[in-house]
Image: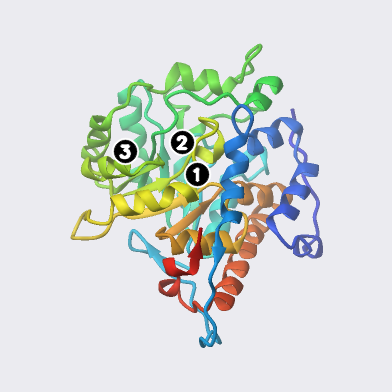
Amino acid sequence: MESKEAVVSVDDLERALNIADLEALAAEALPRLAYDYYRSGSHDELTLRENAAAFGRLKLRYRVMVDVSRRDLSTRALGAAIAAPLIVAPTAFHRMACPEGELATARAAGAEGSIMILSTLSNTAVEAVVEAATGPVWFQLYIYRDRAATRALVQRAEAAGVEALVLTVDAPLLGTRERDVRNRFHLPEGLRVENMTAAGMGRLEERAGESGLAAYVAELLDPALTWADLEWLASISRLPVIVKGIVRGDDAARAVDHGAAGVVVSNHGGRQLDTSVATIDALPEVVEALSDRVVGAGQRPLILLDGGVRRGTDVLKAVALGASAVLVGRPVLWGLAVAGEQGARRALQILRGELDLAMALAGAPRVEDITADLVVR
């Protein structure tokens, strides 16, 4: 399979008014195997849809007669200044979307004042991505059965200059993504899991009757992880560790108690256990569970959220309910597929622009003014 290369003018890109417009353009640009991989959820895709639908059930009690002539969307995450509470989520295989892949994504994130979280399963080595980046890069980690290879990967990421580790904990096995099974998902010719090539784990090939990625995960990743493994990871690196894949308050508390600097409320974009709770519905319980916890030098644990964020009002609601920022994955991939770096930037610009307007109309000129009383369930 060869990737299509979309030819989109600046005017065409600007006419993409929202993330749905970008996805429609991406659907035309991408081969079916790649598009289905990026967009799919597990089994009936109920959680995939529910992540977005749950935001729509939350209503906003906006304030009036507030001076919103100037807005400030800036905030911080683990000490890093970001232009808005938007972070690029870890997603795999960006070179299926455009030839420059993760290099284009890293440049786009930096240009828009965001953080990029690079996936273990990237098509570009971590060293090259950090070198290309103009903003902070964090590294998402899967723990392999081969602990020596995992340790070497952590050391590589740290030496390259990443500023945090994001440990994914909700994928002991891969959820059944039926679109990928039908397509017999595999990496196209010339693409590899670059970060694992040196360890002999870079190939992801076609498998008869199944997803090649599901087979890769079942054979190579460790399904026996416990909280002791989080302590192990924290012990072998000086970097802060954020645990991604939390939907319960008790698990959030355990993560912090075992060395995490924060959590990502996430159900893997609806790609793991179908009928899982929507992340925006899970967020309040996690916030409550961590309300009395401290990490590091007396800091509050970082709480992030991903899943279903498609509008600026979604970002507003997540921040109001206690998230410091949201992660966006598929929207960036749609932009990347349409116009590479410029398309990825457009995705972030759309969401930031919508958030800016939502803050003005809600009477919240600064991020710290986005409080829980704005949201009604």
Question: Label 2 crowding class (10 Å Cα cut-off): few <14, some 14-19, many 20+?
Answer: many
Image quadrant occupied by the N terminus: top right
Say which of 220 and 69 sits in front.
69
- Residue 236 visible in image: yes
Q: Nearer the viewer, mark 2 or mark 1?
A: 1
Q: Which residue is mark 2?
A: 120
Inspect the image, locate mark 1, and give the three-letter code of the amino acid beneath it: Pro
CA gap, disc 3 to disc 2?
13 Å
Q: Which residue is mark 3?
A: 155
Say whether marks 2 and 1 touch (CB < 8 Å): yes
Residue 5 in the image: x percent, y percent? 77, 44
> Earlier along the polypeptide chain: callout 3 or callout 1?
1
Say which of 264 and 126 sits in front.
264
CA gap, disc 3 to disc 1?
19 Å
Displayed quadrant of residue 36: top right
Inspect the image, locate mark 2, and give the three-letter code of the amino acid beneath it: Thr
Residue 133 in the image: x percent, y percent? 49, 55
Q: Which residue is mark 1?
A: 90
Relative to residue 253, is residue 42 depicted above or below? above
Residue at the top extreme of this rendering: 208
State the SS at label 2: loop
Inspect the image, locate mark 3, and give the three-letter code of the amino acid beneath it: Gln
Displayed quadrant of residue 172: top left
Q: Which residue is pictured at 71% across the width and 60% down the height?
A: 18
Say which of 101 and 370 sits in front.
370
